[in-house]
Amino acid sequence: MATFALISIGRGLAGPWYPAQILRQMIDIGYYSLPVVGLTAIFTGMVLALQSYTGFARFEAESAVATIVVVSLTRELGPVLAGLMVAGRVGAAMAAELGTMRVTEQIDALTTLSTDPHRYLIFPRLLGGTLMLPLLVLVADIIGVFGGFVVGTTKLGFSPYTYIDQTLQYLETQDVVVGLVKAAVFGFIVTLMGCWNGYQSRGGAQGVGAATTRAVVTASIMILVFDYILTEIFFSR
């Protein structure tokens, strides 16, 4: 799999590039994933505000709710949840599409026509996922914080000015940057798992179904594993 990724990146960077394919993947991965990622983010922010308030009320630390919401979303929940949702939507679609092309010999046809499958099919997907997931996570962070703001000001009794002040006071640039770095890694993982499993699929429709399942499961597990590894790298003391 590592060799597959290196070959795809090397041949893709060497050119020729296929701008139409890259743009198509960026739109499919980024724009069309906005609804599901946005819904996930806003309800996560709302639930996080409620749960944080319930817990901190026991220690009379309700003022920390805004801080917990924004730090949790930017550092962890935003990248991880967006990655998992994109894995379920995009990773499965890529595995199914490439798997179908493999079992119907369309990939072999590309090779026959002197078109490199790694350059034409794989690299645009890897590039699109790596570039677009950080943008999705940035939008998800904003939407999630807004969800916490709505619950905090309408249900929990916070002053809008106080909530915003607490959010901005304790949010650091490092929190956002680390979340975006995680998102880029997760985007690469999701697209790599989808492309790898689809490209290697065999055995007709049953093989395509198995490849789709493997793509989602392996991408989800690797997102959680690399989330810990990246957190250890950036925040260990």
Image (cartoon, rainbow, N blue to C red):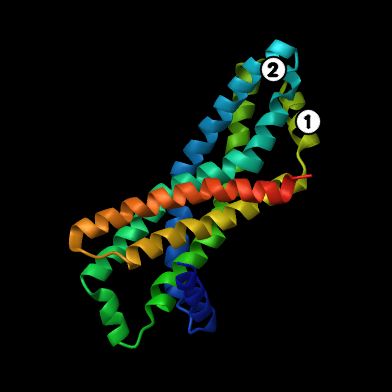
Q: Residues within 10 Å of mark 2 (few under 14, many from 20)?
A: some
Q: Residue at x 77, y 24 (%)?
A: 162
Q: In this view, does 112 lie to the left or right of 48?
A: left
- In the image shown, does 89 or 150 lie closer to the viewer? 89
CA separation, marks 1 and 2? 19 Å
Position of the N terminus, as image quadrant, is bottom left
Q: Could one spot residue 134 in this view of the protein?
A: no
Q: In this view, does 153 lie to the left or right of 85?
A: right
**Residue beneath label 1, please?**
165
Q: Percent from the top left, x then y, of residue 181?
A: 64, 55
- In the image shown, does 128 or 139 lie closer to the viewer? 128
Q: Residue at x 59, y 21 (%)?
A: 51
Which corner quadrant of the image does residue 198 belong to?
bottom left
Per the image, label 1 sits on a secondary structure element best described as helix
Q: Which residue is drawn at 59% across and 27% down?
A: 48
Figure check: 12 above or below 27: below
Which corner quadrant of the image does residue 185 belong to?
bottom right
Give amino acid for label 1.
Answer: Asp
- Number of numbered discs visible in the structure rendering: 2
Give amino acid for label 2.
Answer: Phe
Q: Percent from the top left, x then y, of residue 146?
A: 61, 33
Q: Percent from the top left, x then y, of residue 56?
A: 69, 17
Q: In this view, does 26 lie to the left or right of 54?
A: left
> From the viewer's perspective, is the residue at label 1 or at label 2 nearer?
2
Per the image, label 2 sits on a secondary structure element best described as helix
**Residue 56 has which mark?**
2
- In the image shown, does 150 or 119 lie closer to the viewer? 119
